[in-house]
Amino acid sequence: MPVRITDIREVTKPISSPIRNAYIDFSRMTSSLVAVVTNVERNGRRVIGYGFNSNGRYGQGGLIRERFAPRLLEADPRTLLDATEDNLDPDRIWTCMMTNEKPGGHGDRSVAVGTIDMAVWDAVAKIAGKPLFRLLAERHGIEADPRVFVYAAGGYYYPGKDDTALCAEMRSYLDRGYTVVKMKIGGETIGEDRRRIEAVLKEIGRNAQLAVDANGRFDLATAIDYAKMLRAYPLFWYEEAGDPLDYQLQAALAEFYPAPMATGENLFSHHDARNLIRYGGMRPDRDWLQFDCALSYGLCEYQRTLAVLKDAGWSWRRCIPHGGHQMSLAIAAGLGLGGNESYPDVFQPYGGFPDGTRVENSTVTLPELPGIGFEGKSDLCTIMRELAA
């Protein structure tokens, strides 16, 4: 019997928290959880691929249920198969989802497609009986490395959170094996942020490095004021100072901040990535790119983004995706990216690693689990199987 998708299910789940960054609070944040059900069985279980969208963009249940899932379920199943007809073809599925969609407008649509795409790739790797990171490495003719650099993202603004609590949070990450930690800036005055940064740097000492993230809050003048302040400190990077589509701001900022900068998590297509490289003044010898496949049409589109970077002379090692999820972790291991974000304490159970995975010197080693590896994380697997039941 040919492989086919028999059902696509979606549920919108809350991932609310009292935290805030410089731009938004997360008190009403949601995420879409998707199950792509197939007619294939492996080890006595129906193969089901799972996906979800990254934090910071809300659940996309309406778009998934009304546009993208129906297109796949109504398609001739054979048009969604690879050449062997023994597995699904993610690129054909992606093309089917994007049928009758105009180019441009990379907003919430990219999140809906990326969520389903994650579930499709999970199913494809499970049908193949391989971890996704090894499947990707084989397809690209490169050697997979299950060891991936990760950093701990946190340092949000909490109600009543003082410098002592912030430092305790950062110390907890070091205690869990991280050597790079990140905190938010731009949600208070520049003087207050300077005090917070100095407190954290004193806490972590020489045992770790600190990255700071403004979440696109600043205009050019403020971004430059912060750059002049931040360049006095040995930071890992200065992230997303201004609006993600203001390439001129990013380019101008480089004149005032010679140390590494990072951006890209809110760019959702390979076209936007190309424009960032062309016009954003990003420096391939030091800067970092944070495109997140779960927000930007999925892995099919992310591979096109990587091709754009390669053509422009950028190493894939300069990519450290946003999102803190296992999908980007698998891509990093399979395609040799520079690492992956990690959320040790927030946005659970969607962030983090399979149970028993240890962080050592800011590096994790992926287990040999079929698919993306969601089944290895018990709290996440529980809610996924509830959806599929």
Image (cartoon, rainbow, N blue to C red):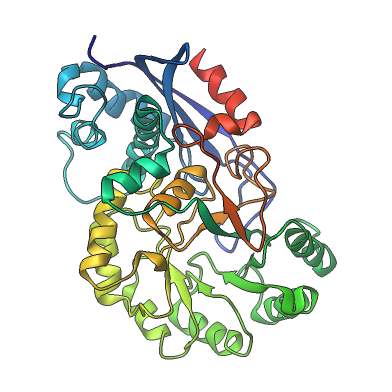
Q: Which residue is the extreme one toward the front?
A: 143
Q: Quadrant of residue 73?
A: top left
Viewer can see residue 242: no
Horizontal side, residue 366 vs residue 154: left or right: left
Q: Quadrant of residue 197?
A: bottom right
Q: Vertical placement of 294 versus 251: above or below?
A: above
Residue drawn where x is 41% and y is 39% of the image: 132
Q: Vertical placement of 82 versus 186: above or below?
A: above
Residue drawn where x is 19% and y is 22% of the image: 85
Viewer can see residue 80: yes
Residue 150 rendering spot, x and y as whole percentages: 57, 58
**The one of 326 and 146 positioned closer to us in this rendering:** 146
Q: Vertical placement of 343 versus 125: above or below?
A: below
Horizontal side, residue 238 vs residue 167: left or right: left
Residue 268 rendering spot, x and y as whole percentages: 33, 53
The number of discs equals 0
Residue 160 rendering spot, x and y as whole percentages: 81, 59
Q: Which residue is the extreme one toward the right?
A: 164
**The one of 386 and 355 positioned closer to us in this rendering:** 355
Q: Vertical placement of 108 versus 209: above or below?
A: above
